[in-house]
Structures are given as C-alpha cells and as structure tokens.
Image (tube, rainbow, N blue to C red):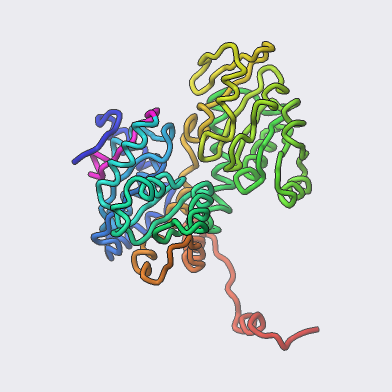
C-alpha cells in the first residue's frame, strides 16, 4: 500500500487517540454500525482531502466500513496529526498522504497521490481537491458522480465555480447543514480557536481587548468564548446586518483601523483576503498578537508584514515575532494558518460527531441519488439534518415533545384565525 506519513511507528499512539475521540462520537458510531451491515458505499472510490485529525480517523474508518475505498490527504499543511496519519495507513489500511508542516509542493503532491484512487466521489475541506481536479486532473472528471464540502471557504469557492458554469459535478455543502454550522462553526471553532491561541501564547485573556474580525457563525462562537474568559471583545465587520447583530449582542463594533490601535489579540474568521494589512500593522500596540481561524493563510497580509519588518524570529512554538521599523513587535501565530488546528487539536470530538455524520450520510445520499443532480452546489437534505439532531439528543439522553394530531392539523391549516 502506498502512503506518505511522518513516522509509521506512531500508529499505536494514533489508535489510542482515535479511540478516545470515538468515545465522544455516538452519532457517527451508530452510522458506522449500520454501514457495516448495509454497505451503502460498496465499491465507491473516495478521495478525501480533510484535516487529518482523530475525528477524521473515525470518519475515514466509517466510510471504509460502508464499503468504500478511501484515500486521504491533508487539507492544510499544518493541521495533520502525524500519529493519526500513521494509524490510518498502518492499522486501518487506508492510503494516507499527510505530514504536519509539509511545504506547498509536498501538499499538492499528496493531493495528487490521493487522486490515484481515481475517485468517484470527492470529500473536501476548502475545495483544493476539487480545484486540482478541475485544473490539473480533468481526466478524472468523467468517473466522478459527486462530492461533499466541509467548510465555509470551500463552499464559497464551489458556488463561485457553479455560478461561472465551470463546476463539473454536483457537490453537497455539508458546511451549510444546520447540525454543522450552528454547532461546529459556533461551539467548535469558538472553543478550539481560543484553545490554540492559549496553547501558543499562554497569555491571560481576562481584561485584554480581543478583536474578532468577522461575525459569522465562527466569529460569534469565538466572541462568546473570549468574553467568557473575561476579555473585552471588539467586532469588526463589513456586513451591516452582522455588525448590528454584534452590537445588539453586547459587543463593541469598530472599523479595523480603529480596532488596530487598541487590540491586544486579533483573530480573523472571514474567509476573505488581507483583512489585517499594512496600514493596520503600523497602528498596532507593541506586543499585539495576530491569529487566523479562517481556512486559508491569506486573511493576515504576512507578505506586507515581512516588508515593513526589520527583524523576524521564532520566539515560541507557533509564535513568530516581527519587529517593525518603528521598534514595535507583533506576534503572528501558526504562520497565519488555522490556529485551532496548527497550534491545538481542532474541534472537540463531540461537535465533530455531527459534522462528520453529515459527511457520511451525504456520501450515502449522493451515491444513491446523483443521477438527479445538476452540476451545482446543493444543501444537505433536511431529513438528514433532523435525523442527526435526533440521534445526538438520543445519545445525550434528552427527550423532546412531539406534535399532537390537533397541533399538526393546526399548523397545516389556514382557516383558524383570531
């Protein structure tokens, strides 16, 4: 079997960590048990470009249990957990191509190696896999009947491709499932991003000014957690509705130009480019910390920071110091990449349980129904979303009410008024 991991001898450590994650993933475990019986993915070849974490280990094993042939590569050069990559290759027998800290050439070589499976389905996180297929491996497209996309940034890219008429096969936007963005994006990103910042810096949050760029679901989650740690939270936004929501949620809302002068810690979660740039760096306080939890390392304009710096050094693991021409020192975490994965372990398993349940069930759905789809981006079917929520509540031993026949009739009628 072909694979490329840092150290295959880390497999046993990876197995134990995957077991630990699996204990907190009851929904995906239930799906795996059914997949083992029914084999809904029998014979399907899947190329999966995901963050190679313990939770991804559980997902990949679930797809394999469903009968799929799976090849895995990393969706970010710094997010791989090397022991999990070794576990997938050695113990699960899944060809895996991922090494934490790999350079750009190695990253794309690994994507091409994962594509050696000649996929019928893609499973992506950020759309690098899909984009590589559309630009470099168009010979594979004829066999691909569909795909899934995990994250906001990837969905944005794919919708843009569909709008321009260049998307060559249908993709389900797993990110847009309510059991994904309401929980993974908010509670997962909120906790794991703060975890990454704290592990990298060991700085006290209480009393400091924490600037969150972007008040989408991820930004909401981080703002909530930073406030819970005692930070004074400032939100920057370009969308007036989201800015108004942040204001009414009790946060101060400023332009980045204003926030740059007062912030102690900055984190971008927008999915856009150069959110923090040269004019902002020049306004910042000595010691300001810059981090990003958006998918790509473009939200902080690091090339501009390099141009205006006179010195640069690694001062801690995942912390790089830039000394500006005026003597101010700014600190960039994890090379401006996803700080929650590059400096910590990513989202807790309990929340990834729902996200990856969406991946598994969407893979099953598109396998069975792909003939009905156009070359567009589709939402996760509502019945899948509701079933995942039901299974999660059941696993948490929470019961909810059901509508009475009278209530169902009332909600379906229009003749009962005042």
- Kindly give the residue lying farthest to the bottom in the view shown: 415
Residue drawn at (60%, 40%), measured in percent from left and top? 269
Any part of residue 24 in sight: yes
Main SS class of the magenta portion in the image: loop
Any part of residue 351 in sight: no
Horizontal relation, residue 370 to residue 193: left or right: left
> Does 162 appear above or below 133?
below
- Kindly give the residue lying farthest to the right in the view shown: 418
Q: Position of residue 51 (x, y in %)?
A: 41, 41
Q: Position of residue 323 (x, y in %)?
A: 61, 14
Magenta span includes 366: no
Instruction: Identify the image quadrant of residue 144.
Output: bottom left
Residue drawn at (49%, 68%), measured in percent from left and top? 383
Residue drawn at (58%, 35%), measured in percent from left and top? 299
> Does 91 appear above or below 354?
above
Q: Which residues are magenta?
A: 88-103
Magenta span includes 91: yes
Horizontal relation, residue 291 to residue 68: left or right: right
- Kindly give the residue lying farthest to the left in the view shown: 1
Instruction: Identify the image quadrant of residue 97.
Output: top left
Residue closest to the eye, 186 or 101: 101
> Does 225 appear above or below 369?
above
Q: Position of residue 243 (x, y in %)?
A: 74, 46
Image quarter of the C terminus: bottom right
Image quarter of the N terminus: top left
Q: Position of residue 297 (x, y in %)?
A: 52, 34
């Amino acid at each position: 079997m072909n694979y490329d991991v840092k150290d295959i001898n880390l497999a046993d450590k990876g197995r134990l960590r995957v077991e630990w994650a699996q204990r907190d993933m009851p929904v995906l475990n239930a799906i795996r048990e059914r997949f083992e019986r029914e084999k809904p993915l029998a014979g399907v070849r899947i190329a999966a470009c995901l963050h190679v974490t313990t939770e991804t280990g559980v997902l990949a094993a679930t797809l394999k249990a469903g009968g799929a042939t799976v090849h895995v590569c990393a969706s970010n050069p710094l997010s791989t957990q090397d022991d999990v990559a070794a576990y997938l290759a050695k113990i699960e027998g899944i060809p895996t191509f991922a090494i934490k800290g790999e350079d750009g050439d190695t990253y794309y070589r690994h994507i091409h190696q994962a594509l050696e499976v000649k996929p019928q389905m893609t499973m992506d996180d950020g759309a690098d896999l899909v984009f590589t297929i559309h630009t470099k491996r168009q010979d594979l497209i004829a066999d691909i009947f569909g795909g899934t996309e995990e994250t906001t940034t990837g969905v944005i890219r794919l919708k843009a491709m569909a709008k321009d008429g260049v998307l060559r096969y249908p993709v389900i936007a797993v990110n847009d499932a309510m059991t994904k963005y309401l929980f993974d994006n908010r509670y997962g990103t909120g906790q794991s991003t703060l975890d990454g910042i704290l592990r990298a810096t060991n700085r006290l949050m209480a009393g400091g000014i924490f600037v969150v760029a972007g008040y989408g679901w991820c930004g909401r989650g981080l703002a909530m957690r930073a406030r819970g740690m005692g930070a004074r939270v400032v939100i920057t936004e370009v969308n007036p509705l989201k800015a108004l929501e942040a204001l009414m949620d009790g946060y101060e809302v400023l332009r980045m130009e204003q926030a740059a002068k007062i912030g102690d810690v900055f984190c971008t979660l927008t999915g856009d480019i150069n959110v923090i740039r040269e004019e902002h760096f020049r306004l910042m306080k000595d010691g300001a910390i810059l981090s990003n939890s958006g998918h790509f390392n473009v939200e902080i304009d690091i090339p501009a920071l390099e141009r205006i710096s006179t010195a640069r050094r690694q001062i801690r693991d995942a912390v790089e110091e830039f000394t500006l021409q005026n003597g101010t020192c700014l600190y960039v975490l994890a090379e401006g990449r996803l700080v929650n994965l590059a400096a910590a372990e990513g989202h807790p398993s309990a929340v990834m349980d729902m996200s990856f349940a969406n991946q598994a069930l969407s893979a099953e759905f598109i396998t069975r129904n792909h003939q009905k789809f156009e070359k567009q981006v589709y939402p996760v079917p509502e019945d899948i979303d509701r079933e995942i929520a039901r299974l999660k509540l059941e696993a948490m031993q929470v019961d909810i009410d059901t509508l009475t026949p009278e209530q169902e009739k009332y909600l379906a009628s229009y003749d009962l008024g005042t």
